[in-house]
Structures are given as structure tokens and as C-alpha cells.
Image: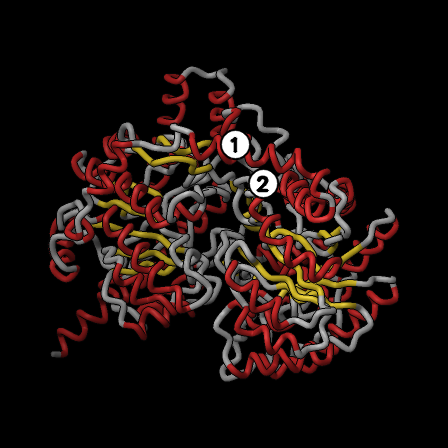
């Protein structure tokens, strides 16, 4: 019979127990023992769910107090040298300092995990990195699971992927030179697993789905030639794309099995089946680990029957990737439309889908009722009238190429905007959101419960908006925002104002650390029945003489940070969202808002893993943004914001967005990311973030001024803006005011320095 397993399970808990325990620990309201106790309860509960679903293994090692890559860094003993922590004695408090920074050091750099919205902490490696070992939390968790009589399959990120995703700040240093030491450490880990009676270990190597260079592929072979000699069987796991071109190489290695993602890359099955030895395990990811639609179980079973007949128990059934990327369970969803709910499958339900597939391959009669029920659900979804909207389809059909262009090129627009807006050199602004205080959250919750009338809620939000504006004026910001006090989430807020979206009560997904998001569900055509933020922007502008920046979420981010319908191309859904945002941008301009920001933090995230697929994505994603921004006059300044992504490889497409100003995250990398924009000669305005809003650390004026001076070496000061890395929603007011005050002082100081130097140069001339 085909065996069943998963790569990982959501770790935050059905009610976000881990998040609240973390935040309590950070506030000093609870201790280390309390947080560890909550974590242990969650692990035990999740393992029991896997056993109850009759999986052949429970997966251990997928839990993290903040991030799995950080966990591995702590296990390997490869902590950043600048923190001066003892790896083997690392405390939870120190672990969180690595993730969040402290008074002496900024946090480790953070970026997106491949093409997902999950963020990982980037390892910092150098010539002195030893991999001599660190904390034993990984082994403690294995011992816990074994004590509960589970059949355990540990999971770790593989050594090649770990090195590939790491960085070194030492010029000219080759990370591959660390491989011999890294392999020794992995061998010691495998030996420790053998001593605990572990039969299988899963090593995740999604880097195999990238365009790896020759030396990395050779290193891959060398590493697994060594690791394969271990007595613990290795399941080498790939996901997020095809790795079929590496099948001949992998087939020669002494690994005992390979996992492939057949949701993202179904075409690779034949290559792997033909190439892998007959006695090797082939694990196939047939349940989507990144989306929430019920699978076509009958179709999957039918396609697998010949494969099962050949491989038998050497065929393993699994999700495509870790279930970290989907919500926990549908059980607590009481308000979803019954029909829509029946179409969905969260992590817990996906366990049952895996079990049904395995049962159907072994005993078709026993699985027949479940297969019939699943087929009926799919038929109902396909025939539902709730999905189609004729008005939307007509608008999509009427789109022209001219709609994707501004009236004039940036050089001409910038002169018009400078005359109209009269901004100073190095203008200061923020990204959009300000702290969501307990009072704001309580008012929103009371409104949702029906305890606060709509008018009363509006008045409270307007009072909060007025307060945020006063603070910005007192600080001395040049371009203000209304603070987004009424917004629960940058995607969900807008989705709630559109037709074609549905929403969960508890569909939370971990974004990073304790930060969770609740992605809305796109089930049908997207339509805007009325303006979304025009009233709020106009109210804010009525309270101040300074410029107000209207802030929207862009079409690509609305797409990427939602659970997207799978019955039409993503490009079509993106175009529908672009038309919605275009209408909103035009209405904002008509209402007198002269600076409009269309946030696209997910633009890079949506890029496919293989370069051969980039052009198609970049064409429709860029077009979607340009359609959303292309309907306004030259005098209206369009901004966009992107954060925590590697942009350098797609800079031509970012330039093709033709935003007047782009704001990006650069503080954690000490402006390193900006070098690519300089080398590319990025032509438009740019605001490199000068401090990290995901850390409570408040940088000094001198620190931020040094970053700005570094930026001026790369980008002319006339095109530079000054801003934080990201929004301020998760920060408290004391640290926010302190950091912004320092930022503004740094900008003013550098502005005066530049103007004095220019005056002196004129006098000398």
C-alpha cells in the first residue's frame, strides 16, 4: 500500500496560540517555561492529528519559535558573529534577538521563502563559520514524539539549499568553501538520528528547482554522495517547481527516495518514474500545499493507479509542500457560505484527502463513498452562478494597450510634479500604516460583533486619523498618510469592499515570527461596487495643508496574498484586480489626492522559480500594475512600495512599472540592495528604507544619516526619498515617534549638508 506523509504542518495553532504566547514573552508578561509549554502542547496536538489521519509518519522538525531557517542556523551553531552568543547555550531570549534585533545589533536580514509570502531569516556566513553545533531543540522534539509512540520522520532544510539561501558580507568569500565543514555537521546529525532509531529523514532541497549553476550542482552530488552513506534513509524533497532536469544526477546518488511537486509541475512525473531506481521511494505531492481548494480526488487516483501497480509501497502520497502555507482547519469556520465552504480544504482536511487517495489505491471499494462526495462538490462548484460576473468580463474584453501607459515619460512628468507638489530635497514620508493601538483593535472588534454602530465606529476612526495626522505634523514629515487606522490588513481591507471575494474567521497563516495573515479567498470575478478609500483620504486631506498620500494595495499583491481561484489563469484574475484599482486611482485623483501609492510588495514574490518562465509572468504582472496606474494626469505622482525581496534580477521589469517613486527595504542589508538599482541606473525616484520597522530597535540619527549618505553615492539626491522600510502597524507609538524623529533629523541634516556644499561650489565657480 502507498505510504502517506506530510512535509510540515501549521505551527501557530488553531487559535494562534503560539503567536499570543510569543508576544506575551516579548512583553515580559510570561517566562521561557510558559512559552515552551505552549509549544510542546501544540506539537503534541499536531502529531496526534497526523496519527488520527492514519499517516504512516508524523513529521518532526517543522516547528519553529520564529523561523525554520533560524532554527537550522541555531542547530548548526552558525550564529552571526556580531551577536557574540554561545551557540550551544542559546536562550529563547537570544534566539528572538537574532530575529528582532537588540539595542546593539539590528536583526538578521529577512526575505521571502522562494515564491511564497513566508519570510525566512537569512543566515550570515563567513570564513570563520564553524558549524560546530548549537542547541538541541531539534532532538528534544524528536524525543517528545518518540515518547508519544509516533513513527517519526524528521525534516531539515538540506545543506545545499541552506548555503544557497545564505549570505556573506565578506567580499569575495565563496560560501561553497564551507561545504566540507557543513557536511560533517549534517553527518553528526544523521548519526544522532540513527541512535534514536529513526529510519527516514527528509532533507528539503527546493534549490534544485532553481537554475543552479554548475559548481552548485557538482557540490550537490558531492554532498549527497557523503550523506547517502548514513544508515538513516534520506528522502530528498523538492517542491515549488520541476526538478526533472536533475533526475539523472539524483538517480545516481545513494539517497533512498525523492519527493516531487506534481501540483506545480505535473509534467515531471514521467522523468522521475523512468529515471529513479525501482527500489527507490518516489514521493509525489498531489495535494496542493499552497491553496485551499478541494482536490479532484478521482482524477488523482486514476492517474496514479498504474504508478501504484508498479511501485507499491515505494510510492508515497503527500502534499506538494509543507502545509505551513494554508490555514489550520475548516472546523471553526461558522460564517462561510455553505456551498463555498464545501469547496475548500485546509491543512486538517488535506490530511484526510491524502488518506483517501492512499485508501483508494489500496481498496477502491472502501474509498468509493469519499470519492463520490468529492466529485459531487467539484461538480457543484463548476456549475455555480456565483462565480461569473458579466460586467467584469465586458470590462476585461475592452482593455486596450493604451490603458497601460502614462501620458508622458517620467522625465517630463517629474518636472510637472516638482512644480505642482513643491517638495524639498530628500522629502520624508512613511509607507502608510501607523501603530494599531489596543483602542483601534477593540473598536474594530466591537464593530464586527455588532456592539458598535457604523456611525460611532466611523467617528472613532476619524478621531484616530486626526490624532495620527497631528503627530505626523508635529514630527515634521513632508508627505503625510492617513494612517490606515481602519484597515485590518492591507489585502483583506480592500477585498472586503469587492465582489468575488470571501473571508474566513480563523483562516490564519504565518507570515513571519508572530505575524499572521488571513488571506481572503478569490472565488469569482472581481468587481468594485463603489469607491473604497476616497472618503477616508479626502477627510484626512481636509485636516491638513500638507500633502496626503493615498495608499492602495496593487493588483499583483492582491492576487499573491489571496487564495486564488484555480479555474482560470492567474493573469486573468490579476487583470480584473488591475481594473478595480485603476478606477479607484482615477477617483482619488478626481477628489484632489495628488500622490497615490500602489503597494506591490508581492511583485518579486510571484516570479516563477525557473527563468524560462519569467517573461510570461513579468509581462502580465507589469501590465496589471501599469493599467492600475495609467489613468491619471502627469501631475499626479504614483508611488509603489516593495519590501523584503531580492529585486536585482528583475530590475528592468521594476523600471517598466514606471512608478514615479518606488520605496524599498534596504536597512537590514545596509543599503546593499540599492547597489543593484545604481548599477542598473534606475531612472525614477526611489526611497530606500533607512530603518527596520519589523524590529523594536530605534536607530540613531547618525546611523540613518550614514545610510542616506550611502544612498546618495548610488542615486542622485534629487531622486531620493526618505522613509522607513515598511509600514508601522506592528510597532508601538513611543518607538515609532522616536525612530521617525531621528529619521527626519537625519534627512534635514543631510539636506542642509548637500545644499551647503552646492552653495559653496557655486561661489567657487
Q: How many marks?
A: 2
Viewport quadrant of the C terminus: bottom left
- Taking the spot 48% from the left edge, 58% from the top edge, the residue there is 115
Q: Quadrant of residue 191?
A: bottom right
Label 1 or label 2, whichever comes before in sequence order: 2
- Taking the spot 39% from the left edge, 48% from the top edge, the residue there is 557
State whether residue 11 appears in this view: no
**Does 416 appear above or below 187?**
above
Please, what secondary structure does the residue beneath circle 1 have? loop
Residue 403, image x, y percentages = 17, 48
Q: Along the line of sight, which residue is nearer the eye, 514 or 266?
A: 266
**Does 27 appear above or below 224?**
above
- Residue highlighted by disc 2: 327
Q: Along the line of sight, which residue is nearer the eye, 48 or 168?
A: 48
**Does 280 appear above or below 531?**
below
For the residues bearing labels 1 and 2, Cβ distance under 8 angstroms: yes
Q: Residues within 10 Å of mark 2 (few under 14, many from 20)?
A: many
- State the CA–CA distance, disc 1 to disc 2: 10 Å
Residue 430, image x, y percentages = 36, 48
Residue 259, image x, y percentages = 64, 62
Residue 223 shown left or right of residue 720 in the figure: right
Colouring used for the render: secondary structure
Q: Along the line of sight, which residue is nearer the eye, 486 or 716?
A: 486
Residue 243, image x, y percentages = 54, 68
Labelled disc at residue 219: none
Residue 59 shown left or right of residue 693 in the figure: right
Labelled disc at residue 504: 1
Q: Residues within 10 Å of mark 1 (few under 14, many from 20)?
A: some
Please, what secondary structure does the residue beneath circle 2 have? loop
State whether residue 247 appears in this view: yes
Q: Quadrant of residue 159?
A: bottom right
- Taking the spot 42% from the left edge, 51% from the top edge, the residue there is 726
Amino acid at each position: 500500500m502507498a505510504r502517506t506523509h506530510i512535509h510540515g504542518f501549521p505551527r501557530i495553532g488553531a487559535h494562534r496560540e503560539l503567536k499570543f504566547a510569543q508576544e506575551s514573552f516579548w512583553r515580559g508578561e510570561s517566562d521561557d517555561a510558559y512559552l515552551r509549554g505552549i509549544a510542546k502542547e501544540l506539537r503534541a496536538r499536531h502529531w496526534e492529528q497526523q496519527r488520527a489521519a492514519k499517516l504512516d509518519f508524523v513529521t518532526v522538525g517543522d516547528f519553529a519559535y520564529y523561523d525554520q531557517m533560524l532554527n537550522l542556523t541555531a542547530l548548526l551553531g552558525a550564529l552571526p558573529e556580531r551577536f557574540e552568543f554561545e551557540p550551544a547555550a542559546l536562550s529563547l531570549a537570544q534566539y528572538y534577538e537574532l530575529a528582532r534585533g537588540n539595542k546593539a545589533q539590528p536583526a538578521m536580514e529577512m526575505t521571502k521563502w522562494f515564491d511564497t509570502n513566508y519570510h525566512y531569516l537569512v543566515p550570515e556566513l563567513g570564513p570563520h563559520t564553524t558549524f560546530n553545533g548549537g542547541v538541541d531543540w531539534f532532538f528534544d522534539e524528536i524525543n517528545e514524539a518518540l515518547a508519544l509512540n509516533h513513527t517519526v520522520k524528521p525534516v531539515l532544510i538540506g545543506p545545499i539549499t541552506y548555503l544557497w539561501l545564505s549570505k556573506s558580507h565578506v567580499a569575495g568569500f565563496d560560501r561553497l568553501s564551507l561545504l566540507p565543514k557543513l557536511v560533517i555537521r549534517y553527518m553528526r546529525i544523521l548519526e544522532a538520528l540513527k541512535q534514536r532509531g529513526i529510519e527516514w529523514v527528509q532533507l528539503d532541497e527546493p534549490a534544485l528547482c532553481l537554475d543552479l549553476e554548475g559548481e552548485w550542482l557538482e557540490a550537490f552530488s558531492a554532498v549527497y554522495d557523503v550523506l547517502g552513506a548514513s544508515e538513516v534513509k534520506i528522502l530528498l524533497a523538492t517542491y515549488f517547481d520541476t526538478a526533472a532536469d536533475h533526475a539523472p544526477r539524483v538517480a545516481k546518488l545513494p539517497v533512498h527516495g525523492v519527493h516531487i511537486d506534481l501540483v506545480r509541475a505535473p509534467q515531471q512525473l514521467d522523468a522521475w518514474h523512468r529515471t529513479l531506481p525501482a527500489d527507490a521511494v518516489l514521493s509525489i505531492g498531489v495535494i496542493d500545499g499552497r491553496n485551499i481548494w478541494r482536490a479532484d480526488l478521482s482524477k488523482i487516483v486514476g492517474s496514479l493507479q498504474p504508478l501504484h501497480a508498479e511501485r507499491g509501497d515505494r510510492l508515497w502520497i503527500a502534499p506538494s509542500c509543507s502545509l505551513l502555507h494554508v490555514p489550520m482547519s475548516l472546523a471553526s469556520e461558522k460564517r462561510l457560505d455553505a456551498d463555498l465552504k464545501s469547496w475548500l480544504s485546509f491543512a486538517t482536511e488535506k490530511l484526510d484527502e491524502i488518506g483517501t487517495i492512499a485508501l483508494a489505491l489500496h481498496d477502491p471499494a472502501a474509498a468509493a463513498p469519499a470519492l463520490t462526495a468529492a466529485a459531487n462538490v467539484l461538480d457543484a462548484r463548476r456549475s455555480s452562478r456565483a462565480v461569473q460576473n458579466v460586467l467584469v468580463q465586458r470590462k476585461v474584453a475592452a482593455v486596450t494597450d493604451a490603458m497601460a501607459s502614462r501620458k508622458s515619460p517620467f522625465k517630463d512628468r517629474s518636472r510637472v510634479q516638482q512644480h505642482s507638489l513643491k517638495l524639498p530635497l530628500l522629502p520624508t514620508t512613511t509607507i502608510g500604516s501607523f501603530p494599531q493601538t489596543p483602542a483601534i483593535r477593540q473598536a474594530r472588534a466591537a464593530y464586527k460583533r455588532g456592539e458598535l454602530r457604523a456611525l460611532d465606529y466611523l467617528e472613532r476612526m476619524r478621531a484616530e486619523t486626526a490624532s495620527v495626522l497631528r503627530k505626523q505634523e508635529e514630527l515634521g514629515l513632508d508627505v503625510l498618510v492617513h494612517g490606515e487606522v481602519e484597515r485590518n490588513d492591507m489585502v483583506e481591507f480592500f477585498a472586503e469592499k469587492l465582489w468575488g471575494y470571501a473571508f474566513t474567521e480563523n483562516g490564519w497563516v504565518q507570515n513571519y515570527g508572530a505575524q499572521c495573515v488571513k488571506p481572503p479567498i478569490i472565488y469569482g470575478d472581481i468587481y468594485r461596487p463603489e469607491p473604497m478609500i476616497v472618503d477616508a483620504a479626502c477627510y484626512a486631506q481636509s485636516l491638513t495643508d500638507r500633502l496626503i498620500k493615498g495608499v492602495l494595495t496593487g493588483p499583483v499583491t492582491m492576487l499573491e496574498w489571496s487564495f486564488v481561484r484555480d479555474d482560470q489563469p492567474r493573469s486573468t484574475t490579476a487583470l480584473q484586480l488591475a481594473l478595480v484599482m485603476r478606477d479607484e486611482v482615477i477617483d482619488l485623483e478626481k477628489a484632489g489626492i495628488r500622490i497615490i501609492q500602489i503597494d506591490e510588495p508581492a511583485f518579486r514574490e510571484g516570479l516563477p522559480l525557473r527563468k524560462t518562465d519569467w517573461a510570461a509572468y513579468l509581462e502580465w504582472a507589469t501590465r496589471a500594475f501599469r493599467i492600475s496606474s495609467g489613468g491619471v494626469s502627469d501631475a499626479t505622482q504614483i508611488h509603489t512600495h516593495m519590501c523584503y525581496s531580492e529585486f536585482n534580477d528583475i530590475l528592468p521589469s521594476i523600471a517598466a512599472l514606471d512608478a514615479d517613486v518606488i520605496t524599498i527595504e534596504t536597512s537590514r542589508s545596509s543599503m546593499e540592495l540599492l547597489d543593484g538599482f545604481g548599477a542598473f541606473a534606475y531612472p525614477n525616484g526611489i526611497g530606500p528604507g533607512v530603518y527596520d520597522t519589523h524590529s523594536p530597535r530605534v536607530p540613531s540619527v547618525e546611523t540613518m544619516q550614514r545610510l542616506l549618505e550611502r544612498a546618495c553615492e548610488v542615486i542622485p539626491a534629487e531622486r531620493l526619498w526618505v522613509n522607513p522600510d515598511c509600514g508601522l502597524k506592528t510597532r508601538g507609538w513611543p518607538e515609532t515617534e522616536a525612530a521617525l524623529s531621528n529619521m527626519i533629523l537625519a534627512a534635514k541634516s543631510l539636506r542642509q549638508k548637500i545644499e551647503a556644499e552646492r552653495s559653496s561650489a557655486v561661489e567657487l565657480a
